Image: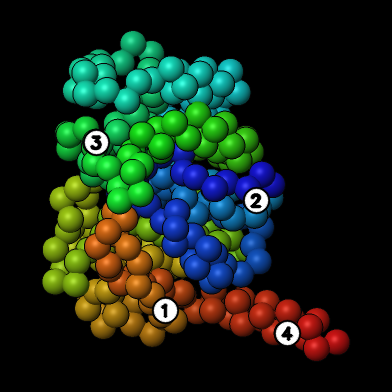
Amino acid sequence: MTEITRPALRYHGGKFRLAPWILGFFPPHKVYVEPFGGGASVLAQKEPAPTEVYNDLDSRIVRLFRVLRDPAQAAELARRLELTPFSREEYEGWCYEEPVDEIDAAHQVVARGFMGQSSKGIWQRSGLDTRINPDGYCSRINALRASPEAVRTMAKRLAAVLIEHDDAHAVMRRHDREDALFYLDPPYLTAQGRGTHIYTHDFTIADHRRLAETAHALKAMVVISGYPSDLYDQELFAGWERHERKALADGARERTEVVWLNPACSRALYIARGDLFAEQAA
């Protein structure tokens, strides 16, 4: 597998830097499903499984990934990104105009994300980010310049991935089996139980409760990520294995990220690690 060193999309709440840590909690599996795919940062960096499913409700993101699945369209998207100037006129004008075709729509999403001041730039105008780092570089310019190659490598990674645009619960029920691994990265819920009001399809407390009901009913192995939450820890996923670590949110603010593992995942991971230790001791 070609190593992916940069994300093809700057996505709010994306787990590109955290992915290696999250992948450490993935036991062996034959089917891999991301019902809340977002920027697919974890999928991009994991070893391919025999069957992999990406799903998201946001039509703009799904359109991008469908373009990446088509070799000719992905090549044209990379070419257009190479010709994209990092300019205020381009960002404030073309980036938010009605797209002329599917490739143009994908082009706008990638450009908005890398050119904007905030990782929320896919959905919200945040202004062109012209800030210069202490080392003299403008990180947003460098990110846009690197985007064509990131698109090319991501297109190769997605070649055998099933792209869904459906309700996450329907996707989970459709692909549920004992040798499947579900990685759930739903819209964040704060420690105080409030939604973030950022995503196109945000989550209420009721949505998180419904997610828990579906997750508990699965035969599959499940890993869930999010911020620390009393609702998750004390009620919805009480009793699930829990791990946390510090991470930088949007490249600056320190936050605590948490993963919860269902019992099936914990058992499979324990067995896999036991086999690994046995091999090392032999």
Q: Amino acid at mark 1?
A: His
Q: What x and y, as percent, mark residue 34?
A: 47, 52
Q: Are marks 4 and 1 in contact (CB under 8 Å)?
A: no
Residue 56, given in percent of the width and then of the height, sits at 38, 42
Residue at 27% in and 67% down: 254
Q: Compare marks 1 and 3 and give the one earlier in the sequence.
A: 3
**Residue type, numbered disc 4:** Phe
Q: Earlier in the sequence, mark 4 or mark 1?
A: 1
The numbered disc on residue 243 is: 1
Q: Which is more toward the observer, 259 or 256?
A: 256
**Comparing labels 3 and 4, the label whose residue is closer to the camera:** 3
Tell me which residue sits at (73%, 79%) in the image: 276
Q: CA distance from mark 2 to mark 4?
A: 23 Å
Vertical placement of residue 267 versus 64, above or below = below
Q: N-terminal of the two: label 3 or label 2?
A: 2
For discs 3 and 2, the disc positioned in front in the rendered view: 3
Q: CA distance from mark 4 to mark 1?
A: 21 Å
- Secondary structure of the residue carrying numbered label 1: strand
Q: Earlier in the sequence, mark 3 or mark 4?
A: 3
Residue 70 appears anywhere in the view: yes
To which residue does mark 2 refer?
48
